[in-house]
Amino acid sequence: MPAGIFITLEGPEGAGKTTQADTLAEWLRERGHGVIVTREPGGDPLAEGIRALLQNPEWALDVRAELLLFLAARAQHVAHVIRPALAQGRTVVCDRFSDSTLAYQSAGSGLPLAEVRALNEFATGGLAPDLTLLLDLDVTLGLRRQGEWARMERRGVEFHRRVREGFLRLAAAEPERVRVVDAARPLEAVAAEIRAIVDCGLRIS
């Protein structure tokens, strides 16, 4: 059976990743693709438990502890959800993946990029997306859009600006994989561009 396709959606807070992931998945299903939609942190019962801990604003997590929790959730998610689906020839649409860790924990929180990359490589077993859609927008607009603020959203505008800059550096370094989409536009305009990118880049029929 041919291997499945792995698509991730990334971006700062309030960029509309969850909405666009669901919209993309529905479009793919209409074309006969077996699709699962998942998210990070989460996607697996154990990983969802870690997600709840990470989102709790009452915990004062050390940045290294935070990184390791994200990676533990990812390792579980990859092993129990993503790799099995890809092995079955299904398309996986994931709301956040490795690029978020590089942007948030390295660019945002200041952990060394090389170390974060190495740990992520270990957690994923080398798994990388076939295509990443970076939904980009000004962080002040994104934070205004975000209805409910968990621990990550409360870190301040400057933190989130560093995160956005980190995402854009990743896109500049890997333009074939990471495609930047202006997420400040209406939802349907964003969705139409995503469909065009996926259709062209992955030859979705």
Image (tube, rainbow, N blue to C red):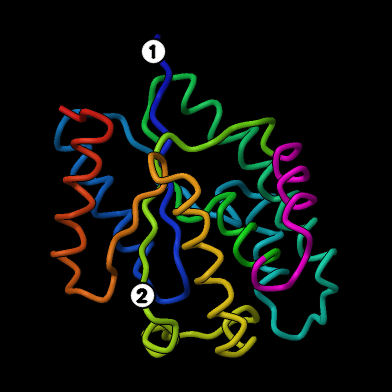
Extreme top residue here?
1
Q: Quadrant of residue 66?
A: bottom right
- Cα distance between the residues tagged 2 and 1: 36 Å
Report the front residue among 87 and 127.
127
Report the front residue among 45 and 27.
27
Horizontal placement of 28 versus 2: left or right? left
Q: Position of residue 105 (x, y in %)?
A: 70, 65
Amino acid marked by disc 2: Leu
Q: Quadrant of residue 158?
A: bottom right
Q: Residue at x 47, y 71 (%)?
A: 12
Q: Position of residue 161 (x, y in %)?
A: 53, 80
> Magenta part of the protein: which range?
107-123
Q: Earlier in the sequence, mark 2 or mark 1?
A: 1
Residue at mark 2: 137
Q: Quadrant of residue 68?
A: bottom right
Magenta segment's dominant SS is: helix
Q: Position of residue 63 (x, y in %)?
A: 81, 70
Extreme front residue here?
172
**Element type at marker 1?**
loop
When the figure is inspected, residue 82 is found, relative to residue 61, above or below; the finding is above
Amino acid marked by disc 1: Pro
Which dot marks residue 2? 1
When the figure is inspected, residue 67 is found, relative to residue 140, above or below; the finding is above
**Element type at marker 2?**
loop
Specify whether residue 129 is painted magenta: no
Which dot marks residue 84? none
When the figure is inspected, residue 202 is found, relative to residue 162, above or below; the finding is above
Q: Position of residue 154 (x, y in %)?
A: 61, 88
Q: Residue at x 54, y 26 (%)?
A: 84
Specify whether residue 110 is painted magenta: yes
